[in-house]
């Protein structure tokens, strides 16, 4: 081979403009890939990264693994292509659960569901079904950072953030900000085709009241828009000392839309296994739309690109159809969420770190601006100065902690004010404690008493009595340790 040939063969064959654009987007995923390959493991990688950035609930992984090992059964049909819309047994089981826990105004049937390999796929394809390339979808800021990738990547749909003050979030005033942004977007040549609502909200961790959801639907009716309600955290609400009586989850499916002058064919709901069922890796999501057959047909035409694997489908179906185990799991999950939230917030209070109380999901927002503004104490440690803006300081703190084995989610990635961080609390307690201890060591903070070494005490079965106020059709309204 000549030098010229070697030089020629070392050059990559060019991609299409679309392929190259995705390659650029793929570069944004490289840190995630790198981090996942360096995840903490107490035996195999004790110096690895402990992520408090991902919205993953690992609190019941052991119980789920045990259950699924005992209830994994495949039939001959599981070895075939099956239905493009998703296995009928799963759609029947999920329909039952939605009818039992989401209180739909009209019963959901399997024909109302399109299954996909996670909400990432469903959101991307749904965006292309309701909007054209260059069109926009309105969503209140802050919002889930993944939509910045999922909406434009395949179909070029633009997420248009609507700044809403914290004081107006989850109130009727929230929707008024959408009117102004709709007009501004039209002037910029961005045609708005839909509104995205995350309920319960990510990253605020709060559920929406019924009247606000109705107001959103009226806004969409007024401007002939689709309303997409992401309800992936629907069954992950919980009480705490911060919020003893949290806003109950209210599904968009539960509203009599026609009674409020809204065409029900414009309202669509997203749900999945990842959050409420602690199974991010299973990759199962669902689109529920009851009055838009054209959307069902449109999504069916591309369903072959996002088919759920039979083993994952069979496993989730086994739990959804086991009413006793399902009820126990959802009850225990809420208890675990409450306990994990209390653990983290007690640590935050010990270190005088301000935070926004949450009552749903896996995370809360922590205000690090007091730390980042105290350059007298932390300037040398973090290499921050008064000349830097808050975003630069936020990035510096993020990198500082990451280099010391802890990953947080920068608030700016969620379009939050600079200086905030989203911290997930739903990881195994030993992992969470180690992460918090690493932060204390890195920042030079006093050790919280719960993180101090203790004398070895022989392990004994933990006996806990839980008083639960539970209605099988609306989840848990209160949990109390005795």
Image (spheres, rainbow, N blue to C red):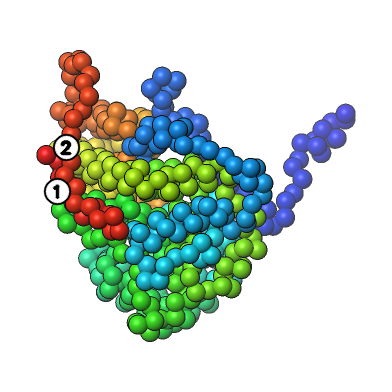
Quick check: 226 above or below 123? below
Give the number of the disc on residue 241: 1
Residue drawn 35% across the image and 59% down it = 100
Residue at left offset 33%, top offset 71%: 213
What is the x, y in percent for residue 391? 35, 51
Q: Estimate the x, y position of residue 376 in percent, counting from the top left.
A: 20, 39
**On the picture, is 219 further left or further right than 26?**
left
Q: CA separation, marks 2 and 1?
A: 18 Å
Residue visible at 64% across and 60% down in the picture: 302
Residue at the disc numbered 2: 465
Q: Where is residue 2 in the image (x, y as percent from the top left)?
A: 88, 30
Decide which of 358, 112 is in the foreground and name it: 112
Residue situated in front as seen by the camera: 205 or 384: 205
Q: Residue at 37% of width from left, 48% of height from top?
A: 323
Is any part of residue 377 visible from this angle?
yes
Q: Which mark is residue 472?
A: none
- Please say if 135 is above or below 119: below
Q: Are marks 2 and 1 in contact (CB under 8 Å)?
A: no
Left or right of 190 in this view: 233: left
Quarter of the rendering occupied by the N terminus: top right
What crowding class fits label 1: few (fewer than 14 Cα within 10 Å), some (14-19), or many (20 or more)? few
Where disc 1 sits, the SS reads: loop
Looking at the rendered image, the quarter that the C terminus falls into is top left
- In which image quadrant can residue 395 be found? top left
Residue 384: image quadrant is top left
């Amino acid at each position: 081979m000549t030098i010229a040939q070697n030089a020629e063969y070392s050059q990559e064959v060019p991609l299409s403009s679309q392929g190259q654009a995705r390659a650029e987007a793929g570069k944004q995923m490289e840190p995630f890939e790198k981090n996942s390959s360096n995840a903490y493991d107490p035996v195999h990688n004790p110096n690895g990264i402990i992520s408090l950035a991902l919205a993953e609930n690992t609190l019941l992984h052991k119980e789920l693994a045990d259950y699924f090992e005992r209830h994994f059964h495949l039939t001959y049909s599981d070895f075939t292509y099956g239905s493009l819309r998703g296995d009928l047994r799963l759609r029947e089981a999920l329909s039952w659960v939605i009818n039992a826990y989401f209180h739909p105004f009209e019963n959901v049937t399997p024909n109302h569901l399109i299954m996909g390999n996670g909400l990432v796929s469903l959101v991307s394809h749904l965006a292309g079904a309701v909007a054209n390339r260059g069109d926009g979808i309105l969503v209140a800021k802050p919002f889930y950072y993944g939509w910045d990738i999922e909406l434009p990547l395949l179909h070029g749909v633009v997420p248009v953030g609507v700044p809403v003050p914290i004081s107006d979030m989850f109130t009727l005033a929230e929707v008024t900000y959408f009117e102004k942004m709709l007009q501004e977007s039209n002037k910029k040549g961005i045609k708005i085709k839909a509104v995205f609502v995350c309920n319960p909200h990510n990253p605020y961790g709060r559920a929406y009241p019924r009247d606000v959801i109705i107001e959103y639907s009226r806004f969409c009716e007024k401007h002939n828009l689709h309303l997409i309600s992401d309800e992936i955290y629907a069954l992950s609400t919980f009480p705490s000392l911060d919020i003893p009586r949290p806003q109950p989850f209210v599904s968009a499916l539960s509203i009599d839309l026609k009674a409020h002058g809204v065409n029900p064919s414009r309202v669509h709901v997203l749900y999945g296994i990842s959050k409420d069922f602690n199974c991010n890796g299973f990759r199962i999501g669902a689109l529920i739309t009851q009055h838009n057959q054209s959307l069902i047909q449109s999504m069916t035409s591309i369903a072959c690109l996002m088919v759920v694997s039979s083993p994952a489908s069979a496993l989730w179906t086994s739990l959804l159809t086991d009413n006793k185990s399902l009820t126990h799991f959802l009850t225990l999950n809420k208890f675990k969420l409450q306990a994990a939230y209390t653990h983290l917030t007690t640590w935050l209070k010990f270190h005088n770190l301000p935070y926004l109380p949450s009552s749903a999901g896996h995370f809360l927002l922590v205000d690090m601006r007091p730390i980042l503004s105290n350059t007298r104490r932390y300037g040398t440690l973090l290499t921050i100065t008064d000349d830097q803006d808050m975003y630069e300081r936020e990035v510096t703190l993020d990198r500082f902690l990451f280099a010391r084995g802890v990953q947080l989610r920068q608030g700016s990635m969620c379009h939050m004010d600079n200086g905030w961080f989203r911290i997930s609390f739903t990881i195994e307690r030993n992992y969470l404690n180690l992460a918090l201890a690493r932060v204390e060591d890195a920042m030079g903070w006093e050790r919280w008493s719960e993180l101090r070494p203790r004398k070895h005490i022989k392990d004994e079965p933990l006996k806990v009595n839980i008083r639960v106020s539970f209605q099988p059709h609306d989840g848990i309204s209160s949990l109390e340790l005795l």
